[in-house]
Amino acid sequence: MSHEIEDETAVNESYSVTVPAAVRREAGVEAGDKLRWRVDEDGALSVELVKQQYGAFFKLDAIDIGEPTDAADDHDLVLGDF
């Protein structure tokens, strides 16, 4: 970040907040990113930007295991049936 930005917003009745435009621009917040909220033992609130990662598996090649698969159904089977 090039310089410090400070702004404030109100918490609405559904406990949602809007990230101010200047803060979004300076921090590089984009749609799909997440904000990780923390409250320390002194009650101080901090927010960390968690960037959404796109294409993490883009360069992986599919392999033929000799039978059809369905990732939506099979993803929990990787560690075995519980």
Image: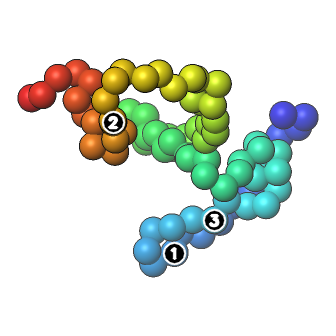
Q: Residue at x 71, y 51 (%)?
A: 30
Q: Please, what is the three-letter code of the amino acid marked with disc 3? A: Thr
Q: Is residue 54 left or right of residue 80?
A: right
Q: Which residue is mark 2?
A: 69
Q: Position of residue 65 (x, y in %)?
A: 36, 21
Q: Is residue 82 left or right of residue 58?
A: left
Nearest the eye: 30 or 4 = 30
Helix, strand or loop at label 2? It is loop
Q: Which residue is mark 3?
A: 18
Q: Is residue 68 left or right of residue 32?
A: left
Q: Is residue 70 above or below residue 65?
A: below
Cα–Cα span, label 3 and label 2: 42 Å
Q: Is residue 45 above or below residue 14?
A: above
Q: Residue at x 31, y 29 (%)?
A: 67
Q: Position of residue 22 (x, y in %)?
A: 82, 56
Cα–Cα span, label 2 and label 1: 45 Å
